[in-house]
Image (cartoon, rainbow, N blue to C red):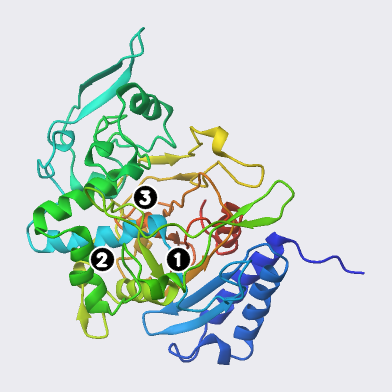
Amino acid sequence: MTSPPSRRDVLKGTAALAVAATVGAATPTRRAHAQGGRGARIDAVLKQAVDAKDEPGVVAMAATDKGVLYEGAFGPRALDQAGAMTLDTVFRIASMTKAIATVAAMQLVEQGKLTLEGAVPNIDPTLGSPTVLEGFDAAGAPKVRPANGPITLRQLLTHTAGFSYDTWDADTGRYIKATGMPGRATGKVASLRQPLVFDPGARWLYGINIEWTGRIIEAVSGLTLEDYFREKIFGPLGMKDSGYVTSQEQRARQARLHTRQPDGSLAVQPLEPVPVKGEFWPAGGPLYSAARDYMVFLQMLLNGGSLNGARILKPETVALMNQNHTGNIQCGVLKTAMPASCTPSSSCLVHSRMRARPNGSDGLSGGSGKRSSRYSLMTFDSGTAMSPSIRVGTTARGLSLMYQSFWCSPARRLRWRLSHSRPFSASISRTFCAQLDMSL
């Protein structure tokens, strides 16, 4: 008797079928369901993963700049409820918020209100007079020094400004405890006022850079972040299910978080309270959206900054965003600074074994100077809690200004955006990326 396919085999099959569904499609706007049975095979693979309880539920889409090639929804929104996953199921999209904030910042660059080079606006001493954490004295007090240069918007957008998350840097966590800083969940601006862990531009580290970018967007535009996103991005694109606060109707369509228990079973977590704004809305993580909504955003980028008559960015701005902006800086491998929060079923090693290589001009466009970003693959799931875990998207030759929510395959000269809501298994991400020749 043939043994049942492993979780890895199932997910590799999904990725392979998704590739088959997109490459060689005769009519780009035709959905994969009608393409010679390919859509049905993708359906079967995803359904099998849900039936095996590898994931509670999944929503998946694949598209080009011309239209949607595949879309499917499988499993329940919550294992203790009858409601099924649908294409308009609402998810907490976590760090996929960062890509939207980056687009907002680049709109202001287009308008001449911000620049990628030069010091960012001095809206707070943390940005205007940055300091670097050098360690702690014998009494445990932090030791800081002035940074050797200003922080630029380019550095914030590429996570090279020097900011960190305490998740990934133990000294940052120690600083927060030693100084009594409020946690980021409090929504207080003071929660962002931490020193850098290296001089601006010296290296790469995932941190609160986009949170500060959001504060700059608010200061320069005169709008709150929620109003800016709604007026400048969500509204023009018709993204009606995207925002910081969900309505009761949207909450009824929301996927629930599930945590993996020691015995391998899944436990449904309570629906979180309706979000309440603190002193600011963070640009780094807490948006809600639906697969169809976010795919509209991705297609706008694939289409050079416009979709359905709505111009969000100029084509040259999108091209600029796709270039390498970090040169030869290496990403390295991130390991959690909070091992106690890891569980046997979760991975606390971030799959960012990406090293930028010489000739960084190649960037996300594969070095040809031509748009090769034709395909977009996106999966949302209500999977198992992975604390902590993140997604880092890079190319074989550096980081772009949109890297927060996708991976690239320069070898195939196709850009695959693998965007998913947290929590989403790191093994799934690795499997998809390995199948698609992603350089992780």
Q: Residue at x 15, y 54 (%)?
A: 218
Q: Nearer the viewer, residue 249 or 165?
A: 249
Residue 133 in view of the camera:
yes
Q: Tell me: 21 left or right of 135.
A: right
Q: Quadrant of residue 101?
A: bottom left
Of badges 2 and 1, the one in the foreground is 1
Residue 48 higher or lower than 279, as above or below: below
Of badges 3 and 1, the one in the foreground is 1
**SS assignment at label 2:** helix
Q: Which residue is mark 1?
A: 91
Looking at the rendered image, the quarter that the N terminus falls into is bottom right
Q: Residue furthest top?
A: 138
Q: Tell me: 426 left or right of 88.
A: right
Q: Which residue is mark 3?
A: 398
Q: CA distance from mark 3 to mark 1?
A: 30 Å
| Label 3 packing within 10 angstroms: few (<14), some (14-19), many (20+) | many
Q: Which residue is mark 2?
A: 319
